[in-house]
Image (cartoon, coloured by chain):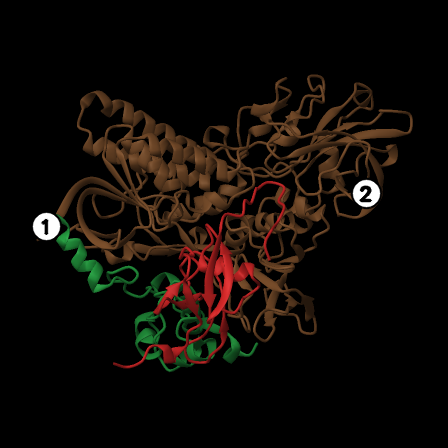
Chain colours: A red, B green, C brown
């Protein structure tokens, strides 16, 4: 959910950015990170943990805790909370199976 | 509290129960616990779990936390690809 | 093939410490490379919508994000500072080579000096399901709200009542998020009482001696189970309470981010008062490695104001070493002395006790210049620190001693009862009617003879703790002027609900005046007419 009005800050929604989440087309905005765009759409679960498949999402939002890792344009383990959203990005939830042995 | 349901190392899914078991087995340094459980080896490199584990060691063993060392850190900080390493060398050409 | 660029100073981290270090060094001609991992400079400042405390010299009274803008503007104009954003320092090697990933290339540098201002990371808490989506660090909530305009939740449980927990709770309310309550494991509130008071008059409960046991939910947070603690911080059986919420915010402290530092052989030591493992350094911010300095939260958890001054001290010391021009040596030394004195003053009051204690453990801050009276509270504020509400005795000390003064007209009442370094009310009063007797740590007192009730202080106070009352406006009504930072904004002649310090509705009031100009900088100053019997209780409004 996006904040429309704020007593101190002004949120100017920049131009729309189209991206894909697990194949589904979604809209984010300029200056979004991947994670902020997903959270803005109400998507909280970003991945599952390595061994126990526990649901995971943003924890620190500044790239320290690695809770928000997703596969972006085929590259795994991208810290989505600090990666700027770009047009056409393919974002996928990831699990251990993504990284296959050579 | 159910220790099995408390995550200490988010990166490697290591629970509080796992940590306490290892400490009780006699592994009382973070470096040892790291080698046996992979805490600190995941993407966050111990940023989230380090302090919590140090405190557990201190509480269970009675060793003062001032004597407990955090894990060793070596370069690079964060990931870097081979492509990026080589590209840096080729700048002057 | 091997390109190692020789440079003068590399500063790692573009937050307040790094920015001020860069400016301090560059002002004396040092060539600086400022490296920042994110695409923007400012660090945590860019998310701080509240007004800062401390001394006006270090931007007290100004909103954090504005401070960031001011510093960044100066950086951009300085030809001695090269800024590398979206760049990450990869390694600091024993031969003093520094590798930086910038522009998708790993570049190598050989700096004469290095200042590490990498800040801090959030502490994590151990409770069941602590890794569920919807469990956020406090910084994450701020980032989502203030940087990206994303609402983190509909209703949130705040764990931790330090300054960050209290400030973020207030910012959540401003963003339209309900705060179920603030819980605190200790028996008293950890942050400044004025922050707690702001929350209480919005109706947010603060539960001390409570902790979280479990986050409830399948794929994301749907609630939390909290419980009460006894005086030994142990769980009291049968006190479990379910709090319905869709997010849990952990504000349980920060710890220095020393990863890069630990690549070198600097000595670290665990000091709980400073947040955890800190690098050992001297009073010039230099570590045991010559020409390797630290500044800001990485050297010990404190505040933005101290980060700015520590950055100055580090930057000036590097300038002293690199700029051999004798003409400047004395000048630089003088500035370093002044900065150190200012830092000492900031830490002199009761809220600085923790940091002073921590620094003493590494042999610093042994100044015998402390006036014992300065470091003791002036009032008994135990009730205030447990509840966020001042006691009647506290209030009495700040009110006029004679009824006559109320007949004068509108007068300012300062509801500031806890000593911490802060002076915007003193510096901002155009009539010099507020005084701290020359010491930034003292409580402010209003000289009712000089006060004209102009209400400038109402918007200047970072704690929103100044109110103007005109008791005898009419025979049956009084006017109360208070600060208001929420939407919808009240309008003149509107009837609003009036709330007391506990956030309870006590009566209705009529809005007589709304001031929202440049000076107020988004702290709307509202004057409301209320029945006279409520003039001392009126501390908040609710726009219907």
The image shows residue A23, relative to residue C11, as above or below, that is below
Q: Residue at x 57, y 56 (%)?
A: C160
Residue drawn 46% across the image and 80% down it: A52
Q: Which residue corresponds to the image point at 64% horizontal and 35% vertical from the top-left?
A: C523
Question: Chain under label 1?
Answer: B
What residue is shown with label 1?
B93
Q: CA distance from mark 1 to mark 2?
A: 72 Å
The disc at residue C497 is 2
Which residue: 23% across, 32% down? C30
Say whether residue C94 is visible.
Answer: no
Residue C43 in the image: x percent, y percent? 42, 46
Find residue B22 and report its image quarter: bottom left
Mark 1 residue element: loop
Q: Badge 2 local density, few (<14 within 10 Å), some, or many (20+)?
A: some
Relative placement, left or right, of C293 versus A50 is left
As drawn, the residue found furthest toward the left would be C1
Give the quadrant of residue C21: top left
Q: Nearer the viewer's eye, disc 1 or disc 2?
A: 1
On whether disc 1 and disc 2 are found on a single subunit, the reply is: no
- The quarter holding residue C195 reads top right
Give the vertical position of C526 relative to B78 (above or below). above
Left or right for C282, reference C290 = right
Which corner quadrant holds the C terminus of chain C? top right
Residue C17 showing in the rendered view: yes
Residue C407 in percent (x, y) is at 82, 20
Tell me: C81 left or right of C243.
left
Kind of element beneath mark 2: strand
């Amino acid at each position: 959910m996006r904040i429309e009005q704020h007593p101190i800050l002004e949120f100017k929604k920049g131009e729309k950015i189209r991206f894909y989440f697990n194949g589904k087309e979604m809209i984010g905005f300029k200056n979004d990170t991947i994670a902020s765009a997903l959270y803005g759409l109400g998507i909280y679960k970003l991945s599952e943990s390595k061994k126990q498949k526990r649901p995971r999402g943003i924890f620190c939002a500044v790239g320290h805790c690695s809770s928000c890792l997703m596969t972006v344009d085929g590259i795994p383990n991208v810290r989505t909370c600090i990666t700027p959203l770009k047009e056409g990005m393919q974002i996928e939830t990831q699990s251990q199976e993504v990284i296959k042995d050579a | 509290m159910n220790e099995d349901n408390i995550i200490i190392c988010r990166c490697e899914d290591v629970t509080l129960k796992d940590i306490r078991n290892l400490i009780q087995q006699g592994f009382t340094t973070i470096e040892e616990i790291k080698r046996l459980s992979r805490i600190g080896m995941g993407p966050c490199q111990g940023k989230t779990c380090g302090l919590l584990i140090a405190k557990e060691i201190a509480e269970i063993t009675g060793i003062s936390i001032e004597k407990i060392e955090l894990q060793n850190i070596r370069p690079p900080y964060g990931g870097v690809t081979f492509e990026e390493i080589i590209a840096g060398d080729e700048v002057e050409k | 093939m091997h390109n190692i660029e020789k440079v003068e100073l590399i500063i790692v981290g573009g937050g307040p410490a790094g920015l001020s270090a860069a400016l301090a060094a560059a002002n004396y001609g040092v060539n600086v490379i400022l490296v920042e991992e994110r695409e923007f400079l400012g660090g945590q400042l860019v998310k701080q919508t509240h007004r800062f405390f401390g001394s006006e010299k270090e931007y007290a009274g100004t909103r954090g994000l504005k401070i960031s803008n001011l510093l960044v503007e100066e950086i951009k104009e300085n030809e001695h500072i090269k800024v590398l954003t979206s760049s990450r320092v990869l390694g600091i090697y024993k031969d003093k080579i520094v590798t930086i990933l910038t522009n998708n290339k790993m570049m190598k540098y050989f700096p004469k000096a290095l200042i590490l201002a990498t800040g801090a990371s959030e502490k994590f808490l151990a409770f069941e399901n602590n890794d569920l989506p919807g469990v956020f660090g406090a910084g994450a909530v701020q980032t989502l709200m203030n940087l990206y305009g994303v609402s983190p939740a509909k209703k949130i449980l705040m764990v931790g009542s330090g300054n960050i927990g209290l400030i973020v709770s207030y910012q959540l309310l401003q963003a339209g998020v309900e705060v179920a309550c603030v819980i605190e494991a200790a028996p008293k509130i950890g942050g400044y009482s004025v922050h707690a008071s702001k929350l209480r008059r919005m109706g947010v409960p603060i539960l001390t001696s409570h902790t979280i046991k479990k986050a409830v939910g399948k794929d994301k947070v749907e609630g939390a189970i909290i419980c009460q603690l006894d005086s030994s911080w142990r769980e009291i059986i049968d006190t479990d309470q379910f709090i319905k919420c869709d997010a849990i915010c952990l504000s349980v402290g920060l710890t220095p981010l020393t990863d890069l530092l630990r690549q070198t052989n600097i000595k670290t030591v665990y000091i709980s008062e400073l947040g955890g493992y800190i690098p050992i350094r001297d009073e010039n911010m230099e570590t045991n490695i010559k020409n390797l300095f630290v500044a800001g939260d990485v050297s010990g958890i404190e505040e933005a104001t101290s980060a700015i001054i520590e950055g100055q001290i580090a930057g000036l010391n590097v300038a002293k070493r690199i700029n051999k021009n004798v003409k400047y040596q004395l000048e630089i030394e003088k500035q370093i002395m002044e900065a150190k004195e200012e830092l000492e003053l900031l830490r002199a009051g009761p809220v600085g006790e923790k940091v002073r204690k921590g620094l003493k453990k590494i042999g610093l801050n042994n100044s015998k210049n402390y006036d014992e009276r300065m470091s003791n509270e002036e009032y008994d504020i135990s009730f205030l620190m447990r509840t966020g509400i001042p006691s009647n005795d506290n209030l009495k000390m700040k009110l006029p001693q004679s009824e006559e003064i109320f007949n004068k007209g509108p007068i300012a009442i300062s509801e500031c009862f806890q000593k911490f370094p802060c002076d915007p009310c003193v510096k901002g009063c155009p009539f010099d009617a507020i005084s701290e007797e020359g010491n930034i740590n003292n409580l402010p007192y209003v000289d009712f003879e000089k006060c004209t009730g102009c209400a400038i202080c109402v918007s200047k106070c970072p704690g929103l703790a100044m109110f103007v009352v005109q008791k005898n406006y009419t025979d049956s009504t009084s006017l109360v002027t208070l600060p208001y930072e929420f939407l919808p904004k009240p309008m003149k002649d509107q009837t609003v609900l009036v709330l007391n310090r506990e956030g309870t509705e006590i009566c209705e009031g009529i809005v007589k005046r709304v001031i929202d100009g440049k000076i107020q900088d988004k702290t709307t100053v509202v004057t409301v007419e209320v029945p006279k019997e409520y003039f001392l209780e009126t501390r908040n409004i609710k726009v219907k």
